[in-house]
Amino acid sequence: MKSFERALITFEHALNSFERALKTFERALKKFERVLKKFGRALNSFERALNSFERGVKTCLFGLLEQEKATNFDLNS
């Protein structure tokens, strides 16, 4: 009977340790989820900035092309 009681106490300790480990894992998972959300927002911001930069470059190139056309038109007149 005594060995069964010791085994039961050992099992209870192991179960408590497992519960603590599970709680620690849950906290770490929540932190990881927050980091992923922040990373997602940062990635979206970067994508918007990249799109804005692309539009700016296209506008600049279009302006240069129009200026070149105007200059060539004036020279050919």
Image: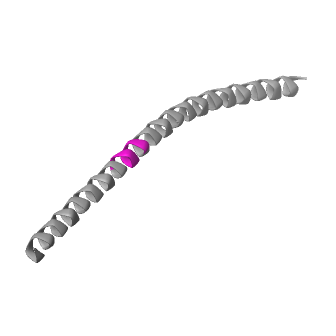
In the displayed structure image, the side of residue 27 where residue 59 appears, left or right: left
Give the image location of residue 41, x and y in percent. Answer: 43, 38
Q: Position of residue 75 (x, y in %)?
A: 8, 74
Q: Quadrant of residue 70?
A: bottom left
Which is nearer the eye, 76 or 62?
Answer: 76
Position of 13 relative to 70 (above/below): above
Residue 46 colored in magenta in the image: yes
Determine the residue located farthest toward the right in the rendered image: 1
Image quadrant assignment for residue 67: bottom left
Left or right: residue 13 versus residue 23 is right
**Residue 63 falls in which quadrant of the image?**
bottom left
Q: Quadrant of the N terminus?
A: top right
Give the residues drawn in magenta, as a range.
44-49
- Above-or-below relation of 56 to 27: below
**Residue at 43% over, 43% down:** 44
Q: Position of residue 50 (x, y in %)?
A: 35, 51
Residue 51 at what x, y percent from top left?
A: 36, 51
* x 22%, y 66%: residue: 65
Q: Is residue 56 left or right of residue 24?
A: left
Q: Nearer the viewer, residue 70 or 50?
A: 70
Q: Which residue lies most toward the front here?
A: 77
